[in-house]
Structures are given as C-alpha cells and as structure tokens.
Image (cartoon, grey):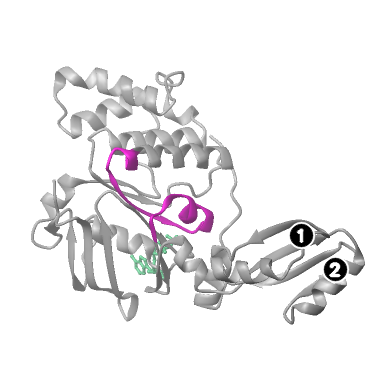
Amino acid sequence: MSYRNNAIEVVGLRKSYGDHEVISGVDLTVGEGSVYALLGPNGAGKTTIVNILATLLTADDGDIRVAGHDVRRAPDRVRASIGVTGQFSAIDERLTGRENLRLMADLAHLERATVAGTVSEMLERFDLVGAADRSAQTYSGGMKRRLDLAMTLIARPRLIFLDEPTTGLDPRSRRELWAIVREQVADGVTVLLTTQYLDEADHLADRIGVLDGGRLVAEGTAAELKRRVPGGQVSVQFTDAATLAAAAASYADATADAEALILQLPNDGTVAGLRRVLDGLDDDGVVGVTVENADLDDVFLALTGHATEAPATEEISA
Ligand SMILES: Nc1ncnc2c1ncn2[C@@H]1O[C@H](COP(=O)(O)OP(=O)(O)OP(=O)(O)O)[C@@H](O)[C@H]1O
C-alpha cells in the first residue's frame, strides 16, 4: 500500500463551534509506518482533530487526506482504512472479552472460518486469556484498554488513531499499552496518538506536534524539541572543596554547591557544548559527571507559556 509515503496529509485545517474557533489552521503530515503524537493540554483540540481525520466530524476548511483518500470526497474509503480507539470505549460491558472481540470481527467482515482463531490469537496477544470468558464489567482499567485496543486492531487496520490511550491508567498498564503500540509499529502500522503526557510522546513518537489553543505551536522529534529550549545542565561532582572552588572560578556561568561538592553548568544539549565543559575539567578531583537534558516539560512551558497541567496517573477501578 502506498499513499505517496504519507498516511496523513492535512493543510489548513479549521474548525469552529459557533463563534469559537477551536482549530485554527493546522498543517500536519504523518509518514507511513511512523508514530505521530499530538501533545497538548485539555481543550487544545486533540480530539477534534482525531474526529475530523476519522470522518466522525466535518472540518470547516482544509485539505485532508487520510490513507490516500480525501475525507470529504471518500469518507467510506477512509473509514475502511483506519482503526480508532477513542476516549470512550467501544466495549459492551455485559459481554465477555471473547464475545466483544467476536462482535468486532463480525462487524469487520472477517472470514467466518478464521474468526474463532483470530479472536483467540488477540486474547493471547493482549494478555486476556484468563479473563476471556468473564464479563468485561469485571475487568480492571488496564484490561479494558487492552480489550478496547484489541477490538480496534482485530480488523488489522494499517492506520490507527489512539485518542489519549493511557489517560487514567496506572504506570504498569501504561507500559503494557506502549509495548502493544510498539508491536504495531514494528508491523508497519501508522499511529496517530493524542496525549497530555510528555513522557508518553517522548517514549512512543517519531514526531511530536505540540498543540495549544487549536494551533500547532511546535513540531519535531523529541530531541529536536528539547534542543529548542534551554533547561539542561551538566553536574560535576568533585572530591574536595578546593578543586570545586578552582573549577568554579574558571566557568563564568557555573553554580557551585559547596556542601554537596557539585558544580552545575548550563548544557545546550550539543556534543560541542558538552566537550567545552569537559575540556575545562581536570581528571583528578572529579568523581563523576551527570548530563541532564531539558525535558518536554521545559519545552512545553517555553513554547506555550504555561505548563501542561497533566493530571497525575491513577488507576481506574474496575
Ligand atoms: N461539540 C462541541 N461544541 C462546542 N465546543 C466544543 C465541542 N467539542 C469540543 N468543543 C471545544 O473545542 C475545544 C477543543 O476540544 P477537544 O475535545 O478537541 O480538546 P482536547 O485537546 O481533545 O481535550 P480533551 O483532552 O479534554 O479531550 C475545547 O475548547 C472544547 O470545549
């Protein structure tokens, strides 16, 4: 399959609700087989963009091609090419995990003879074998997310949209979900995900678009975004106060902690910058060097003027 190597191409996307413009001219390109994260706080417009790309909502303006098809002219073809997992689950809680999967397999018109086998394979792959024949209302939050994702993936879409896939999950369930997403990517599937978690974008995405107030305020790889802002530092631990003081005197921008015997120097994240710092140090008298780069929190704050305000992760009770 080829969509000229781009699974998603968006130019000039706009959407308003009444007088309120919620998406203000977004351009977006997602390469086939890559993971793109739309990162932004509540209300930034992430779900609106996903819903437009998934043909669940109509844009007011913009050229939008998904899986090579124009969302306005060929919505059916778009729908046939994608899988969507939204913030609200598609699970029927009265049914068992196996029954939910079977239902989705039927809806996706999987060949009858292969359905039972494919369902078992999905239960295995998503670690739901033990709970397969229990009603889904007894599942934990993490299990429900895995089942929901399995239901999306049973039709083997080559392009999937995951709208805040791990919001509300405990750290272990989040990592399990990340592993599943990575498996999909290894199979060549394209993923567009939305998240308010900086670490999620950092771990999963090839490219990140920072969305704030309906605009993409920055775009790039995690490393590129981190390089755009100051905030990193190099910490050097010394053996004694005299060596620390001598080193501190030779760096104009250093901050010394005499008690901890640590000198902190700004780090711009480049090899040349790090070399400049290291070249000025004497081997003797240095216990160790730690390099800390700016994190996406720093990036978000620098680009938008406010923090992401992402809620703490918490477990959803069954
Ligand atoms: N049906 C609607 N009618 C009016 N305003 C809406 C509607 N749906 C969304 N909005 C507004 O559009 C803006 C973007 O909402 P959207 O749900 O896309 O944000 P989001 O980044 O996905 O946030 P969240 O993580 O809370 O879902 C918000 O200001 C929201 O209040």
Residue 23 lies left or right of residue 276; in this view the side is left
Where disc 2 sits, the SS reads: helix
The answer to which of 123 and 107 lies nearer the viewer is 123
Q: How many marks?
A: 2
Q: Is residue 194 magenta?
A: yes
Q: What residue do we see at 40% from left, 29% from top?
A: 126
Q: Is residue 196 magenta?
A: yes
Residue 108 lies left or right of residue 315; in this view the side is left
**Does the beta carbon of the residue at mark 2 sit less than 8 Å from ligand 1?**
no
Percent of width and height locating residue 140: 52, 33
List the residue tagged with mark 2. Answer: 244
Q: Which mark is residue 283?
A: 1
Residue 147 lies left or right of residue 160; in this view the side is right
Where disc 1 sits, the SS reads: loop
The answer to which of 26 and 292 lies nearer the viewer is 292
Residue 45 lies left or right of residue 261; in this view the side is left
Range covered by the magenta-colored residues: 184-207
